[in-house]
C-alpha cells in the first residue's frame, strides 16, 4: 500500500510553474490597476461628503481688528457722566493739536451715560437729546474727520452700571445701531446681571452673545467688525477665554488715582501678563496720569507698567488743563514703541519679585524686576515699590531673553540716553520712591575674554573635564 501511493504526490504538494512573457506582465498590470481604480471610486461614492471646516466667527475676524493695543481717550475718569458733544469734539481736537494723535492715540471713546434712560417704541437705544442734540452720526463724523476712530459703551446685562439701557437680549439690534451710528469700538460692561433661570449661561455665554452679534453683522454688512473690549473686571479669568470673543479684557476692579490702586493692579497682572499677545490684550483700565495726587514718579511708573504690559492706553484726564509733565509722560515715543511693537506682541513679565519671595501676591509691594522681548532688543522694567530711594540690581541672565556670554548696550527709555555697556549685571542707582527705570538692552557682541566666573548662572556649571565649577543646585 505504501509503495503504491509514494509514486504520486497530492495536488497541494505539487509545484506549479507560471511563465510570464512581457505581454502577460503588461496585461496583468492593467488588470490590477483597473481593480484599484474601481475600489477607489466605490469608496469615494459611498463616503459621506466632508463638511467644510468652520472656525468660530471671532477667530475668522481676528486678523481684521485689534492686532495691537488700542490707544486713545475715554470719558469716564475725567468726566464720569458729565459730558456732551461739544466736550467730546473739543477733546478730539486737543488730541490732535497736542500731538497725541501723532503719537498714536487715535480712539475717542464714550463711556456710560450717553443715552436716554429708556429705549424708544421700536426698541432702540436713544442718544441723549440734551447731550447730543445733533445725533450720534454728527459726532462720529466729526471724530472721523479728524483722522480718529470712535468708541461707544454698553452692558451685557439689563442695564448699564449707571442704569441706562443695557444690551441683554438686544445684542443684534444694538450692534447694528452702533455700526449705523459710526462707532468702531464697543466697551462692554458687566452690570445688572439677569437671573440664572433666564440666562442659563456662565459669563462666557453672556459675552458670546454680543461677540456673535458683531461677527454676524460684519459678515452681513461687509464691514470690519466693531472692536469688542470686554469689561468684566477680571471675573472668571478672562485671560483664559476672552480672546475667542473680543480683542481686550479688563483684568481687575476699577482704577482710581492713588498709588495703592496702581500697585494692586500691577500686582494682580504680574500673574497673568503672559496672556497678552497680538489680537488679545489684558486691559489694566483707563490711565490716571494727570489725575488726583499722583506724583510725577508714580505717574511714570503707572504709564510704564501699563504700556510695557501691552495694555490698551486710554487717556483719562481733562486735556484742556493737562500739565506739561502729563503730556510728556503720555507721549514718550520710546515707551509707546514697545506697546505698539508690530513684530513682538507679548508683554513683559516678572523674572524676580525683589523684596518678596518670587510668586508672592502682595497688593502693596508688587514684583520689581520685569523683562520681555521686543523687535529691537530686551526690555526691562525696574520698579521701586518702596517709599524711599533704592538701588535695583540684577544679573542679566536672570531674564530668559538675555544670552549668556554676551554684553549689552543699555538704552534708558525715560532719559533717552545710551548708558554704556552691561556685562553680566546692571545696577540702577538711587531710583526714586515708587519710581521706575525702563531699559532697552541690545546685544553688543561677546563679553570680554576671561570674564569670571565662567558661568553667569552657577547651577551645574562644569568644565569639559567634568570638574564642577559652580554648584549642583542654587
Image (spheres, grey):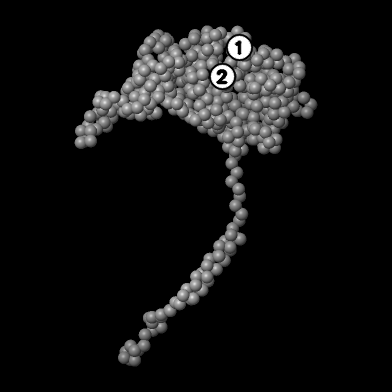
Query: In this picture, is 126 found above or below 259?
Result: below
Badge 2: residue crowd in 10 Å (few <14, some 14–19, many ≥20): some
> Badge 2 is on which residue?
103
Judging depth in this view, the residue of 230 and 42 nearest the camera is: 42
Q: Secondary structure at mark 1?
A: helix
Q: Residue at x 39, y 84 (%)?
A: 10
Instruction: Give the percent coordinates (x, y) of residue 104.
Output: 57, 21
State whether residue 17 appears in this view.
Answer: yes
Q: Quadrant of the N terminus?
A: bottom left
The picture quadrant where one finds residue 150 is top right
- The residue that mark 1 highlights is 319
| Dot 2 and dot 1 residues touching (CB under 8 Å) | no
User: Which corner quadrant of the image does residue 42 belong to?
Assistant: bottom right
Q: Position of residue 99 (x, y in %)?
A: 58, 15
Q: CA distance from mark 2 to mark 1?
A: 15 Å
Percent position (x, y) of residue 216?
A: 67, 36
Instruction: Give the residue drawn at x 50%, y 26%.
Output: 341
**For numbered disc 2, what is the local secondary structure?**
helix
Viewer-proximal residue among 310 and 388: 310
Residue 199 seen in render: no
Amino acid at each position: 500500500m505504501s509503495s503504491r501511493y509514494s509514486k504520486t504526490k497530492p495536488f497541494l504538494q505539487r509545484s506549479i510553474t507560471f511563465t510570464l512573457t512581457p505581454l502577460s506582465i503588461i496585461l496583468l498590470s492593467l488588470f490590477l490597476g483597473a481593480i484599484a481604480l474601481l475600489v477607489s471610486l466605490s469608496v469615494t461614492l459611498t463616503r459621506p461628503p466632508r463638511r467644510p471646516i468652520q472656525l468660530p466667527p471671532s477667530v475668522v475676524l481676528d486678523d481684521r481688528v485689534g492686532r495691537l493695543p488700542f490707544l486713545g481717550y475715554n470719558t469716564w475718569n475725567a468726566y464720569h457722566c458729565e459730558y456732551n458733544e461739544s466736550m467730546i469734539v473739543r477733546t478730539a481736537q486737543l488730541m490732535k493739536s497736542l500731538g497725541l494723535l501723532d503719537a498714536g492715540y487715535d480712539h475717542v471713546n464714550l463711556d456710560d451715560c450717553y443715552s436716554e434712560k429708556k429705549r424708544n417704541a421700536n426698541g432702540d437705544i436713544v442718544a441723549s437729546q440734551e447731550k447730543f442734540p445733533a445725533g450720534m452720526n454728527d459726532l462720529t463724523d466729526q471724530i472721523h474727520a479728524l483722522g480718529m476712530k470712535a468708541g461707544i459703551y454698553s452692558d451685557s446685562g439689563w442695564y448699564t452700571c449707571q442704569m441706562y439701557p443695557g444690551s441683554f437680549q438686544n445684542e443684534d439690534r444694538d450692534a447694528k445701531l452702533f455700526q449705523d451710528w459710526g462707532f468702531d469700538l464697543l466697551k462692554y460692561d458687566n452690570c445688572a446681571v439677569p437671573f440664572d433661570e433666564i440666562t442659563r449661561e456662565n459669563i462666557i455665554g453672556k459675552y458670546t452673545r454680543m461677540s456673535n452679534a458683531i461677527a454676524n453683522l460684519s459678515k452681513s454688512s461687509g464691514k470690519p467688525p466693531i472692536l469688542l473690549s470686554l469689561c468684566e473686571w477680571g471675573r472668571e479669568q478672562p485671560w483664559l477665554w476672552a480672546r475667542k470673543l473680543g480683542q481686550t479684557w479688563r483684568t481687575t476692579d476699577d482704577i482710581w488715582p492713588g498709588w495703592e490702586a496702581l500697585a494692586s493692579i500691577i500686582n494682580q497682572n504680574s500673574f497673568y501678563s503672559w496672556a497678552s499677545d497680538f489680537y488679545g490684550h489684558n486691559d489694566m483700565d483707563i490711565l490716571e496720569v494727570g489725575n488726583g495726587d499722583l506724583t510725577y514718579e508714580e505717574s511714570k511708573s503707572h504709564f510704564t507698567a501699563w504700556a510695557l504690559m501691552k495694555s490698551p492706553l486710554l487717556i483719562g484726564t481733562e486735556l484742556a488743563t493737562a500739565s506739561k509733565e502729563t503730556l510728556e509722560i503720555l507721549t514718550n515715543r520710546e515707551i509707546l514703541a514697545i506697546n505698539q511693537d508690530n513684530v513682538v506682541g507679548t508683554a513683559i513679565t516678572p523674572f524676580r519679585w525683589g523684596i518678596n519671595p518670587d510668586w508672592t501676591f502682595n497688593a502693596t509691594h508688587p514684583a520689581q524686576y520685569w523683562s520681555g522681548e521686543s523687535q529691537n532688543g530686551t526690555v526691562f522694567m525696574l520698579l521701586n515699590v518702596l517709599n524711599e530711594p533704592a538701588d535695583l540690581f540684577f544679573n542679566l541672565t536672570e531674564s530668559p531673553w538675555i544670552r549668556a556670554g554676551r554684553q549689552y548696550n543699555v538704552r534708558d527709555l525715560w532719559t533717552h540716553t545710551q548708558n554704556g555697556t552691561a556685562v553680566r549685571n546692571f545696577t540702577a542707582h538711587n531710583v526714586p520712591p515708587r519710581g521706575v527705570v525702563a531699559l532697552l538692552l541690545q546685544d553688543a557682541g561677546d563679553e570680554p575674554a576671561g570674564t569670571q566666573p565662567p558661568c553667569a548662572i552657577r547651577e551645574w556649571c562644569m568644565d569639559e573635564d567634568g570638574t564642577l565649577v559652580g554648584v549642583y543646585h542654587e
